[in-house]
Image: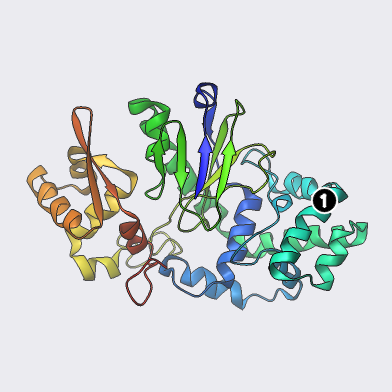
Amino acid sequence: MLRIHFTGEDLTRVTVAARSDPLWDVLLSLHMVQEPDRSLAFSEWRRRTRALRMPGVRPLLELARPWGYSPDFLTPGRGEADFTHQVEDVLSTPCSRLSAELAILAEESGATPWIRELAGGDHQVMARLGDTLTAYHRVALAPYQERIQAHAEADRARRGVALLNGGVERLLAELHPRVRWEAPVLQIPVYADQDVYLEGRGLVLVPSFFCRIQPITLMDPDRPPVLVYPLSPRLGWLRPAGAEGDQDGLAPIVALLGRTRAHVLDAAAAGGTTTELAVRVGVALPVISRQTSVLREAGLLDTRREGGSVRHHVTPLGIALLNGELGPDGTLG
């Protein structure tokens, strides 16, 4: 369990990044490209990326294993700098930090010759790392940057509504279905037990197109606090605008649940009242009430009373269904 401890001052210093962070997207996409094809939303991106001729990418895969620890020095940013400047930050990592973080990686996953060379901070080896990061980003991520940014901007607008309507505590509580806010602690189920004490430093929330399952953070508690959370793109996000079927990337879910119910579930991914869902889907309130009841009984939707209204939120199971991330046995991928 990851537990992030807030003070009163920290609650006044929570911000949402205006865009996804380039190097976090590099790291998390490297995780994703090595994973089994459990996420239908990314199956086409995986296919395209794996087909690319990238003979130099192997060293990155050794640094970014799809499970366990990835070195913090690979992700120095919090969504505020462009890719070129972030790569420069990586290349200026002190040797002592390189050595310490790569020792953790080696203990967990084994030390390859490349990792041993990198731990020494040799200038040529570091330059090779920078070139490889740049080459991978250019072919695997840059072609999709406009779509990634569009998702980030839409998500930020929704977070702004949550903040305006319910303050920072609602923003935190609605960050992701797997997050639990029990003031003054934000709790997130992760593979390792970790406590982060903000102690007045605040927290930057950074959306990531390639973050899966739940939000994540750095291992080093002394680094500037950041929490990276999933943008959760829907099925069909790679389809060109105007292409046949573009209006319904939910086709597999429509086949499973029916058109109206599938669109209600999709509309609820951003959270909303019964009235808000009715407006988004374009159906009458009684229809929304019936469909949310069915989705709730199926474990795909959670409904809570907040103040004078009732709000609907998609459960982790519902998010996994929307993202095509259910395993063959129906469990979360």
Quarter of the view holding residue 239: bottom left
- Tell whether 255 sits left or right of 130: left
Residue 291 to residue 105: above or below: above
**Residue 142, visible in the rendered structure:** no
- Tell whether 71 sits left or right of 249: right
Q: Residue at x 61, y 47 (%)?
A: 21
Q: Quadrant location of the C terminus?
A: bottom left
Q: Residue furthest left?
A: 286
| Residue 305 or residue 79, whichever sits in front | 305
Residue 285 to residue 15: above or below: below
Hey, what amino acid is under mark 1?
Leu
Label count reads 1
- Tell whether 74 sits left or right of 312: right
| Residue 156 or residue 6, whichever sits in front | 6
Quarter of the view holding residue 158: top left
Q: Residue at x 71, y 53 (%)?
A: 74
| Residue 51 or residue 2, whichever sits in front | 2
* Image x and y of residue 210, in percent: 53, 58
* Image x and y of residue 70, in percent: 67, 58
Q: Residue at x 22, y 71 (%)?
A: 255
**Residue 22, visible in the rendered structure:** yes
- Tell whether 254 sits left or right of 76: left
Q: Residues within 10 Å of mark 1 (few under 14, many from 20)?
A: some
Q: Residue at x 64, y 58 (%)?
A: 27
Residue at image mark 1: 91
Label 1 sits on a secondary structure element that is: helix
Residue 38 to residue 205: above or below: below
* Image x and y of residue 73, in percent: 74, 50
Q: What colouring style does the render use?
A: rainbow
* Image x and y of residue 121, in percent: 89, 56
